[in-house]
Amino acid sequence: MRAALLAVLIGLGAPLGAQDAPARQPTVGPLVAPSGVLIIDSERMFSESAFGRRVAETLRRQTEDLAAENRRIEADLTEEERSLTERRPGMDVDQFRTEAEAFDAKVQEIRIAQDAKERALQQASNAERDSFLRQVQPVLGGLMSERGATVILDRRAVFLGTTAADITDLAIAAIDAAIGSGEAAE
């Protein structure tokens, strides 16, 4: 008798318990960070994003253009130096010294100008990276909220971690969807 009563109670409880359980939805990746910590590889997040690829391509083109300009300037200066050297035997000492000093001053001015252009390229690249980091904060904040995390750490600051906590690929996809190559922000 007890066994029959127990079977009836268990049988009645099963449908009630099933009604309380929410339907399980398929998930991709962990929805909750069990430790509250997520990890990203910020270098890869930048370099593999559409924004980072655009910045790298722009910098590559500008660097190549500057290198070509430097080669042209070098060829012109080499020719100018050769001409001065060839004319030297026919010049008096003061005239040669004046032209040689003017040439040296010109070379120094050009070197300073070209170095400034190179620094400007690097500063522009750094400014783009800073802009990227500002623009991705809301995207990363959203991923953090979705995953129930309280912090995102850079892979370089993590001594040991699991790949389950790494959201770099997810971050890249979300960033590309949110800001693309960043050209509209310019």
Image (tube, rainbow, N blue to C red):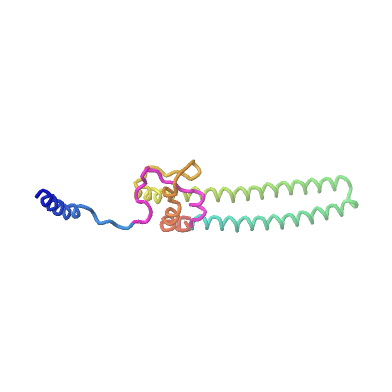
Q: Nearer the viewer, residue 96 or 132?
A: 132
- Above or below residue 26? Residue 95 is above
Q: Is residue 34 magenta?
A: yes
Q: Nearer the viewer, residue 159 or 112?
A: 159
Q: Position of residue 91 (x, y in %)?
A: 88, 50
Q: Position of residue 51 (x, y in %)?
A: 49, 56
| 76 lies left or right of 1 | right
Q: Residue at x 25, y 56 (%)?
A: 23
Residue at the far right in the pictured view: 89
| 31 lies left or right of 171 | left
Q: Nearer the viewer, residue 169 or 117?
A: 169
Residue at the far left in the pictured view: 1
Q: Residue at x 42, y 47 (%)?
A: 165
Q: Which residues are magenta?
A: 27-49
- Above or below residue 20? Residue 156 is above
Q: Is residue 161 magenta?
A: no
Q: Residue at x 20, y 54 (%)?
A: 18
Q: Position of residue 85 (x, y in %)?
A: 85, 52
| Number of numbered discs on residues | 0
Q: Position of residue 29 (x, y in %)?
A: 38, 54
Q: Residue at x 87, y 54 (%)?
A: 87
